[in-house]
Structures are given as C-alpha cells and as structure tokens.
C-alpha cells in the first residue's frame, strides 16, 4: 500500500470512530449511564471504512475512543490510527544481514531469491532472529536486486505453429494413479561449459528419468552428447534401480526416436509416448525439474573449476520432490525387472571421464 493510500485509510477510520463517539461528546450521559450507552453502541453494526462490510466494536474499544477524543483538542486527529515507529524500516533484517545479502548478490546476481535465502541461512547459521523468506524477497525487490533474464533465440516457424496451437486448444494437467505407470525422460543442455581432459571446451548434457506419480528422480547423469548410446546407458541405470515402467514419455529427439531404442522398449513391453513438436508444456514435470537443476545446482557451481561426480549425485538425491514415505511406497509396489540383473549403483560419469 502506498503512503497516500495509508493516510486516506487513517482518515476514514478517524471519521468512523468520531461518528460513533460523537453523540456521546455532544450530549454526555448522566452519571452511571455511560456503561449502558457504550453497550448500546457495541450492539450496532457499522460500515467498514475500507472494505464496506458490516463491522461491530466492543464496548471497551468504544470507551477507549471516547476518553481519547474527550481529552484531545482535536478529537478527529486523536482517533486516527497510529503509525508504527519502525514504519518503512526492515524489522526482520539486521544491518549485518543486509550487508551479507548485498555482498552475496554482487557476487552471484544470477541466483534466485530462494537460493540467496538458503545460502545466507547456511552462512549465518548462528544469526538470530532469522527473517522469513518473504521478508528477504521483499527487501531484494525494494532494492532492485532481480535475477537477470536470459536472452531467447529467434522463434522458428515450428515454434510459432506450436504457440498458435496452444492458444486454440485447451491444456489440462494430468497425473497417473500409481508409481511406475509413466516415466518422463529428457536431455538438457547445461548452462555452463566444462573443460575435458583433452583440453577442449564442451557443453555437457544431463539426462533425467522421472516418475510421474512420485516425482522421484529414477536416474540423473551427465553425458558429453545426446546419442542413442548415452540414452540407452542412462535408461538402463534407471531400470536397474526402479524396475520396469508401463510407459515412457519423451520428445522427438534423435536419440529417443532411434530404432534400437524403440526396439528395446518394445521387447521390454514399455509403451513409448511422444509429445507434440515444440510443446515442452506436455512434459512440464521434466521441464520443472530442469528449472530446479539450473536454479539451485548449476547456480551453486559458479567459480568451481572442476566438477566431481558427487555433484551430479547431489542433484539426483536432493532436487527430487519425493519424500521418504513416497520412496518407501515406491519400493513396496515395484515389480522385479524382467530379464534385468540387479547390479550395484554405478558412479555418475562426468564429461571427459
């Protein structure tokens, strides 16, 4: 609310309160009759000065207004709502916290507000009292500390056709009733390049396999390319860990549409479903996962010279939305994978290893 709007609201409240106690000031009741007059006023309904809805007040509240107006030279001004002494000041943010937040934003302007909040809380674990996330986000917004937007590429004819189809047709969300009924699979280009052992720069590809019902990340791994070999390797790891799904949803990537991958799904009895071209919203659960990977995992790697395999394992273990109870239900309902041997979990392979 702006300062002008707040002042107008205080004036409206003052006029309402004066209209309630004004008759008592104009014609003071006799001795012993004040309590009865206050009870009569408290039983009435009044129009709220801001919302316009009916509102009533207690006898003690009206009594306080009556004595405040009678003792003041300007009764209307005395009945105005008081302004807090710390109005306009961040009550939950100490100067040390504000300085630490400013330094952190200067060092990492691409971080989201949630990531700033989590890192600041980890760095200042002993600070008390600790503000809420909304308080910190409100302060960042007031200071103009926004996350810079990314530059989008020029739309292609296929993108324009997909946008037109999205506007003409209704889009509904869906979620299957059981775990392992549908898996989502997709590759994602990393937002930062890595240096291989051969001395060349490359953009790694992240492969993620998610369960539709539990949102459990069945397998997440970085690869140097998006090929059928990488896809089969990563998907096999997910099968060995979580069993066989009923169906699989992917986009129209070259690796997903490869003949050998489709033949393998047919042999395992997995139905392969594809999204429409240039329609990532149909695989929105997967896209939402990539957003968390970029906003929370990759953003934390600023200034890191070498990526270790455990970094991607952290992505697999921490960024999923599945809870312990969901994972337990997942394990209880899983059927043994047909024609697949149980093998120990392999280490995550990073580009160049």
Image (spheres, rainbow, N blue to C red):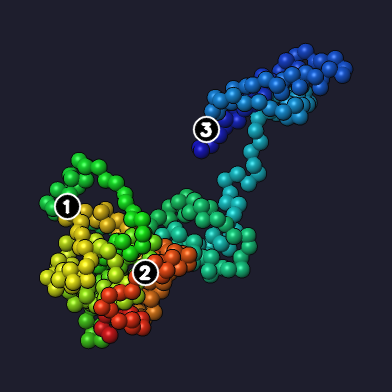
| Residue in the foreground of this view, choosing between 65 and 248 | 248
Q: Are marks 3 and 2 in contact (CB under 8 Å)?
A: no
1 or 2: mark nearer the eye: 2
| Residue 28 place in picture, x, y as percent | 80, 15
Asked whether residue 300 is in view, the answer is no
Secondary element at tag 2: loop
Q: Quadrant of residue 340?
A: bottom left
3 or 2: mark nearer the eye: 2
Residue identifier under label 3: 5
Q: Specify the label residue 334 is tagged with.
A: 2
What separation in Å lies between label 1 and label 2 (alpha carbons)? Answer: 39 Å
First of labels 3, 2 by sequence position: 3
| Residue 285 place in picture, x, y as percent | 32, 58
Asked whether residue 138 is in view, the answer is yes
Secondary element at tag 1: helix
Callout 3 environment at 10 Å: few (<14), some (14 to 19), or many (20+)? few
| Residue 303 place in picture, x, y as percent | 38, 75
| Residue in the foreground of this view, choosing between 312 and 212 | 212
Q: Are marks 3 and 1 in contact (CB under 8 Å)?
A: no
Residue identifier under label 1: 159
Q: Residue at x 71, y 23 (%)?
A: 42
Secondary element at tag 3: helix
């Amino acid at each position: 609310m702006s300062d002008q709007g707040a002042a107008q609201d205080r004036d409206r409240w003052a006029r309402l309160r004066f209209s309630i106690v004004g008759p008592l000031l104009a014609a003071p009741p006799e001795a012993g009759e004040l309590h009865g007059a206050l009870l009569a006023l408290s039983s009435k309904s009044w129009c709220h000065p801001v919302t316009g809805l009916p509102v009533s007040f207690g006898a003690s509240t009206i009594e306080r207004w009556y004595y405040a107006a009678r003792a003041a030279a300007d009764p209307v001004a005395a009945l105005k709502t008081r302004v807090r002494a710390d109005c306009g000041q961040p009550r939950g943010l100490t100067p040390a916290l504000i300085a630490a937040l400013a330094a952190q934003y200067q060092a990492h302007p691409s971080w989201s507000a949630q990531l700033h909040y989590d890192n600041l809380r980890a760095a200042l674990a002993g600070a008390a009292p600790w503000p809420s996330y909304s308080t910190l986000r409100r302060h960042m917004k007031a200071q103009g500390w926004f996350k810079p937007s990314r530059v989008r590429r020029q739309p292609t004819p296929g993108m324009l056709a997909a946008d037109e189809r999205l506007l003409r047709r209704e889009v509904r969300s869906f979620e299957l009733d059981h775990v392992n009924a549908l898996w989502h699979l997709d590759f994602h280009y990393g937002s930062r390049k890595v240096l291989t052992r051969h001395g060349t720069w490359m953009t790694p590809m992240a492969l993620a396999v998610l369960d539709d019902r539990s949102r459990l990340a069945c397998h997440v791994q970085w690869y140097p390319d998006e090929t059928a070999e990488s896809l089969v390797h990563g998907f096999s790891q997910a099968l060995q860990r979580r069993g066989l799904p009923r169906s699989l949803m992917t986009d129209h990537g070259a690796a997903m549409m490869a003949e050998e991958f489709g033949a393998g799904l047919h042999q395992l009895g997995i139905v392969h479903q594809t999204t429409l071209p240039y329609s990532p919203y149909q695989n929105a659960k997967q896209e939402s996962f990539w957003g968390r990977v970029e906003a929370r995992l990759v953003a934390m790697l600023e200034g890191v010279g070498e990526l270790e395999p455990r970094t991607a394992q952290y992505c697999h273990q921490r960024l999923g939305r599945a809870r312990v109870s969901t994972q337990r239900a997942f394990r209880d309902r899983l059927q043994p994978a047909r024609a697949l041997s149980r093998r120990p979990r392999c280490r995550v392979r990073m580009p160049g290893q």
